[in-house]
Amino acid sequence: MSIPFDLPADDHTLSPRTGYTRAHWEAVADGLLTAAWRRATPGGALLHLPGRPSRSGVRSDGLEGYARTFLAAAFRVAGAHGDDPHHLLERYADGLAAGTRTPGRDDTESWPEILDVDVQGQPMVESASVALGLRLTAPWLWEKLDPAVQDRAEAWLRGALRHTPAPNNWYLFPYTVAGFLESVGRGDAETAAARERARDLLESWYRGDGWYADGDGRAFDHYNGWALHLYPVLDAHLAGDADALAHHGGRLRAHLDGLSLMFGADGAPLHFGRSLTYRFAASAAVSLGAVTGHTPLTPGASRRIASGALRHFLDRGALTSEGLLSLGWYGPHEASLQEYSGPASPYWASKAFVALLAPADHALWTDTEEPAPVEEADRVLSLPGPGLLLQATRADGTVRLHNHGSDHVRPHEGESAADDPHYGRLAYSTRTGPTARANAADNHLSVEVNGRASVRRRIHPLGAGHGDGWGWAASWHRPVFVAGPPMVPGLRAESVTVALGSLELRVHRVVGAPPGSRVTLTGWATGPEEPTVSALHGLYGWDDPAPEPVPAPQGTAWTPWARVPRLTGGCGGTTVHVALACLTTGPDAPPLERAVTDVRVDGGTVELTWTRDGSRTRVSFEPPEVRHTRP
């Protein structure tokens, strides 16, 4: 699709895969900012972009427009050492003065005050972008402000230090505000306390493999990259704090071992977790690693991933005809949104422009693009910390994530029966999105009791591991129900995924099911006109090995209408159910009915042979263990 502003000609010598250079990144930032500023209030304090309002209201949404675009402008100008050809910082300085003059007043320009998360919390989120923008541009904006405006800005920002954040990555917002205040000589005991509290929480949320839980539960998603790593690493980098940068940067490097494999050959990030409308912000951690030197990737591979993600969305309709980022994935897509999503929410994509902090002569921009990890070889990587299994195939450039550890259910919450498509599915990919909540669930194991189907909420990891070209992950969950009694005492479902090449072995054991219960398993959701092929085949425990196609009329982020393959079978007491699944592109999908032989099920143990190489896989549930041996 056409992009509604001018870009430089593609450079396929320097960037043979994407054609994008640093000049393209600057042009995209300029185009996005020019379009957004057409919707500014006269004083520039609020940017009222078109679209449905968030639950926080129109004024908060207008502040969001100012703050999130300011972040893009700050990366743009700071990366150019203060060169500001479009006079962006003058606009943001005027807006800061107007917005902080009478905070909380119901007029054209005033910013809402920062209050507790359950009262009026969204401005706390935006305060971090304002503070970070001011810190990045301090020599050219902050230091030129009238002292009275500086005092007013500080007073507004301190609201973030004096009110209660949401119990997750939000604690990094006052951390970032405090870091800015300290950087301009306005630190005190209050700023120190905010930073210490955030650091302590961040340590308690670390789960290994470079992954943080987003709060005290088990929520692992893109917030790791664009928040939980970005704020502390960038803070240490800007402060020149070598010890903090070594600590946080080391974890960022570990995170990028897995994250770098979460982008398809077409540039798409995994469609997994919440706030997906932030789109190419998913590449922010990759670029931050290149900027700070804390990355396992070469500069050419880093740019290939970041530019690939940026171009992926620009080429697929993420921009409106005005040049604004829409609420959705490619174009508008309601099912990808949350209640907190407002017209300016997509502009957290501005975090991707952290890449511009690398100056023009940095290797991130001067080295020739190199392949992304998915383009180099087939890979299977287990991440025991978050309980995830990554499966990438070079031939079609597709990445799949098998979820055995991320559920977004907080410790104090009960297991409500509301389905959460962004976390509850068994698998996600760079080519498919989950079906909408009201449609048949893709990649889902459901137990049906008295005709009532269960959903998967709290996920309990049972282990993960990988070897040469294969890997596994396992978990259990308690099936919960929307209608009738929310649970059946003693009922649990145990799940193991084994990935080999493009094939997925899915082994499930249902324990404690009442007599006459049913079990269903679905595969990947694809559209009839997509090149992506979804296959599912029953090996044991199903009425029929061939799946039935089930419609999903609301489609996915990729297709307006989808279908989902489904297997069904009876269960009662303890039963085992085994299937093969596959997601590929083109006509060369492997025939699943011939992919394995000699399937044996003995109590809690499943063994089979792979026809491709004669290797054998043995899955046990007591204890959870997977062995894969080659002849």
Image (cartoon, rainbow, N blue to C red):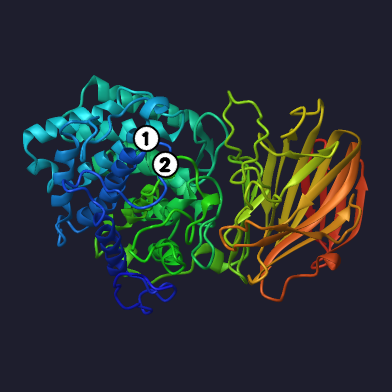
Q: Could you say which is closer to the camera, residue 181 or residue 602?
A: 181
Residue plotted at (77% across, 43% down): 446
Quickly name the residue at label 1.
122
**The disc label shown at residue 7, or none:** none
Q: Is residue 248 above or below residue 293?
A: above
Q: Is residue 624 above or below residue 120?
A: below
Quadrant of the frame with the N terminus = bottom left
Quickly name the residue at label 2.
54
Give the image location of residue 175, x and y in percent.
32, 32
User: What amino acid does circle 1 point to?
Assistant: Gln
Residue plotted at (62% across, 56% down): 554
Q: Residues within 10 Å of mark 1 (few under 14, many from 20)?
A: many
Kindly state the secondary structure of the residue where label 2 is placed.
loop
Q: Do we see residue 74 in this rendering?
A: yes
Q: Could you say which is closer to the camera, residue 41 or residue 416?
A: 41
Residue plotted at (40% across, 28% down): 117
Q: Do we see residue 605 in this rendering?
A: no
User: Residue farthest to the top?
Assistant: 189
Residue 167 placement, left or right of 183: right
Q: Of the two numbered discs 2 and 1 on the same chain, state the one appearing first in sequence.
A: 2
Give the image location of residue 361, x and y in percent.
24, 65
Give the image location of residue 392, x and y in percent.
61, 61
Residue plotted at (36% across, 49% down): 344
Q: Could you say which is closer to the camera, residue 607 or residue 579?
A: 579
> Marks 2 and 1, Cα distance to the nearest angstrom?
10 Å
Kindly state the secondary structure of the residue where label 1 is placed.
helix
Query: Quadrant location of residue 300?
Result: bottom left
User: Residue farthest to the front?
Assistant: 107
Residue 42 placement, left or right of 242: left
User: What amino acid does circle 2 point to?
Assistant: Ser
Q: Are marks 2 and 1 in contact (CB under 8 Å)?
A: yes
